[in-house]
Image: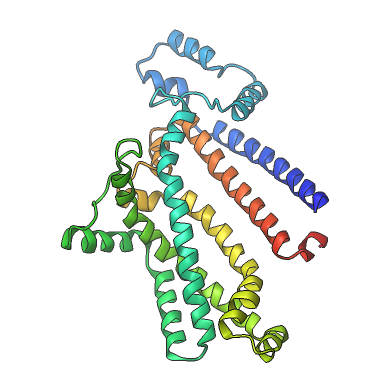
Amino acid sequence: MLGYFCRRILELLVTLFFVSLIVFFVLKVLPGDPAQIILGVNATPESLTNLRNELGLNQPIYQQYGHWLKGLFTGDLGDSLFYGKSVSHLIWTRLQVTLPLTALATLLSVAIAILLGTYAATHHGGAKDFGIVVLSQLGMSVPAFWLGVLALLFFTVKFNLLPSGGFTEWGINPLNAIKSLILPVLTLAVIQSAALTRMTRSATLEILSQDFVSTARGKGLKEGSVIYKHVLGNSLISILTLVGLQIGQLLAGAVVIESVFHLPGLGRLLILAVQQRDLQLVQGIVTLLVGAIIVINFIVDLVYSWLDPRIRLS
């Protein structure tokens, strides 16, 4: 296990290093002068030169990358060109919205998917199985923004049960912060659980057809014990594969839901940074998102090896 873990850690570090290279150099070749963006079109050549020197833009590219890479390890990603604040501070304030949104939506979607997918598989071929399959297909076809608008119309406009948008900071009113996240979480969970339900159903059906399940039933075990002890544990690897991918999609793609519900999350900040050509901020957010996806998949790989030790030998 230790050898497998060390090998995976080395692969993780190498991957993160190449990701940092790609993000840094791709953004450097994009058109646009940060000094010109800050000072405006009426800036004098002297003021532009002074600002470029102050920002380190006149240094060789490898030195700029070295300073930026050092900042990644120390948490200093520079200052936003548009907001004039620390990039790390801006990202952290927005993560306080995006992280709970992603975590709660993931947990809820997994709970829904395991419940419905297992139920459909154990009632394979019946009307209940057919109904769940149809619902999951509809969930995979519905755009997230459309479902979000429907949720607003139903829960906010018609019944006035939940806020229509915005976000109250956790330190000011935690209860209102939770209320602000209920509709976005439900919307994301419904969308994400659709594909996960199909995966859970398929994985469960495959395990149910195995000989060891028939043996467990032949020993007189109750059906609930067979499903819980023998079927779910063996189908988790297939389920985890999709869960790991979905967490990355939620982190990178929550901008749609954040826009619908006017949440000040990381996705909206990235869109604003792109529109304002705030390359320093774009660089920090993209690096964080890509790095988070890689780390999540690394964790999923470790969980794989724990659930199925044969993976460590492959």
At which x and y percent is residue 126? 47, 91
Q: Report whether 201 appears left or right of 187.
A: right
Q: Quadrant of residue 154?
A: bottom left
- Image position of 274 with respect to 150: above or below: above
Residue at image location 49% in from the left, 80% down from the top:
119
Colouring mode (rainbow / by chain / secondary structure / one colour): rainbow
How far from the left and from the top, in percent, is residue 26?
58, 37
Q: Count of labels shown?
A: 0
Q: Position of residue 111 (x, y in %)?
A: 48, 66
The residue shown at (40%, 21%) is: 38
Residue 1 appears in view: yes
Residue 270 is at least partly visible in this image:
no
| Quarter residue 171 falls in | top left
Q: Nearer the viewer, residue 37 or 31?
A: 37
Left or right: 67 in relation to 55 = right
The quarter of the image holding the C terminus is: bottom right
Q: Specify the quadrant that holds the N terminus.
A: bottom right
Please report the residue visible at 23 percent of the width from the left and 61 percent of the height from the top.
155
Position of 7 relative to 230 (above/below)? above
306 up-or-down from 78: above or below: below
- Residue 311 shown left or right of residue 171 in the figure: right
In front of the other: 309 or 130: 309
What residue is shown at x 33% (from left), y 43% (from top)? 174
Q: Is residue 138 above or below residue 259?
A: below
Name the residue at the top extreme. 46
Residue 54 point in image, percent of width and height: 51, 13
